[in-house]
Image: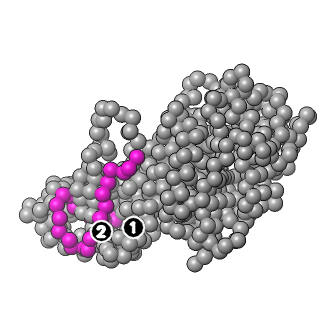
Amino acid sequence: MTDKIDIAFGPLGQAGQGDLVVFMGDDLALGAPARDALGGAGADLVAKAAASEKFKGRSLSAMVLPAPAGLPIDRLVVVGLGSNTDRGKLDWPVLGGFTASKVSGRTARIVLDLPGVATGPEQAAAFALGARLRTYTFDRYKTKKKPDAEDKAGTSLTILAADHAAAAREDEGARSLAESVILARDLVNEPPNVLYPEEFARRAGELTKLGVEVEILEPARMRDLGMGALLAVAQGSVREPRVVVMRWNGGTAGEAPVALIGKGVIFDSGGVSIKPGGGMEDMKGDMGGAAAVVGAMRALAARKARCNVVGAIGIVENMPDGGAYRPSDILTSMSGQTIEVINTDAEGRLVLADVITHVVRSAKPKAMIDLATLTGAIIVALGQDIAGMFSNDDGLAEKIRAAGEATGEAVWRMPLIPAYDKAIDSKFADMKNTGGRHGGAATAASFIKRYVEDVPWAHLDIAGVAMSSNASEINRSWGAGWGVRLLDRLIRDNYEAH
C-alpha cells in the first residue's frame, strides 16, 4: 500500500506548526540548533522535565511534553540517543522509524542535528527511509478501518537539516528504495486468490515502465525447455505456473550479469503431503523470495544502477488434486538430473532447480543469489531475526554478510559439507528431494547446490524473516519485504561501475 506519510526537508531554524522533535544523549545535552528552536526557557523546561520524568536519554526512548509557554508548537518530543557508544553505531533507518512512531498521524518538525553524531544528507535520507517503512500498513481489504496509534489519517514530517537541499536530493533514492520494499511487502501480504501466478507475473511485468526487460514463460515454453521439476509442483493446481525473467542492463554491454533468483510458491498446501490445517494460511507468504527479487529489480532500475542484473522467479501453486505429483514420482529436471520425490511439501527446491538451470544456461552470470522461504528448519536454527546463508564461494558470502550488516537485514553463514549432500542421494534417481528431518535447511541447500554448476552462488533461506517475522522499528507488517535493501546494497557496493 502507499505509505501514509509525507516528508519534506527544510533548513535548521525553519518555523512551522505541529510537534517539534529534538534529540539528546544520555548526558541530557541538546545540540545548538535544538536549543535555538526551543529558546532558553524551552531548553530549561527539557532539563527539568527529564529530571521529573526520570528520562535518561537512553537509546530509542522518548519523552513527550506539552508545548513550552510562548512556543508555537503542539507538543515537544525528545528522543534519546543513548551513550557515546550507542551514538557511534547509530542505525539511521531504525531511528527514523522510532521517531515516526512518536508523531504518527501528526504534523511535526524534526531538528535533525544530533549531539555528538555526524549528520549529513545521506544520514538524513536514511532517517526518512526508516520513517516511511515504519508507517506502512496493508489494509486494502478492510471495509471498516479502525485507526490505532500507528495507523491514522497521515503523518507529515519536515526534517530540518544543515544541508537540507542535498538531503532532499539524497532522499529521492531513499524514497524509491522504500517504495521497492513496499512493493515486496504488498506482494507477500496479498491473498492467494488475488495474487495467483498469472497475476504475480503481470505485476512483475510492470517493471517495463522503469526500463526492465521482462520475459514471461508460460507452461508450453517450460515444457520445451524441459522444466520437469517446476511443472510437477504446479500440476495439482488449476492455476498455471509462470517463470518471469527480468533483465536490467545498466552496465557494460555484454558484461556477465549478477543473477537474483526467487522462489515464488504463491500458496503451499504441501500438495499430497498436505500440511496441517493450523497455520496453513501463512503459506500465502511462501513467495517471499520472489517478492524480494521483484522489489530489488525495481530498486535497481529506479536508481538506474550501473550494472547488469538478471532477476528470475518461478511462480507456482502447490495444491493436491487427482493430477498432483506424488511421493515416489521420479522427475527429470531441466538440467537432466533426475529427482525422486519423497515429500511433495519439499517443493521450493524443485522450482528453484529449474529456474537456476535456465539462468545459468541463458545468462551465464558471474554470481548468483537465490532467496527462498525454504525450510522450517532454518527457523528452528536461527529464529526470526536472521536469515540462513549457504554458499560455495567465500568472497560472495562475505559481500552478502557485509551488505546484511549495513542494512540490518542480517544473515548467518551455515555449513555445506559432503555429508549433507550424501543425505539426498537416492536409490532410484540421481537425488531425492529431501534428506530427512535432521539438518533440513542444509540438505535443502545441498539439493540446490547440485544445479548451480561452477557459478559463485549463495542461497538465503528466509523462511523466518520474510513473513510473520518479529516486529521492528521499521516494520509492523506481516510481510517484511526482507531482502530488497540487502540486495540493493550488495550490488551498489560490489558490482556497480563507479
| Residue 148: percent from left, percent from top | 30, 40
> SS of the residue at dot 2?
strand
Badge 1 amino acid: Asp
Residue beneath the point at 91% across and 34% down: 428
Residue 9 badge: 2
Res. 345 in view: no
Give the answer, above or below, for where 429 lies relative to 79. Answer: above
In the rendered image, the residue lying farthest to the top is: 322
Badge 2 amino acid: Phe
The residue range painted magenta reads: 1-29
> SS of the residue at dot 1?
helix
Instruction: Locate residue 39 relative to residue 101 in the image: left or right.
Output: left
Instruction: Locate residue 475 relative to residue 161 in the image: left or right.
Output: right
Q: Which residue is at the front of the view, 191 or 278?
A: 191
Residue beneath the point at 63% across and 63% down: 309
The residue wearing badge 1 is: 171
In the rendered image, the residue lying farthest to the left is: 70
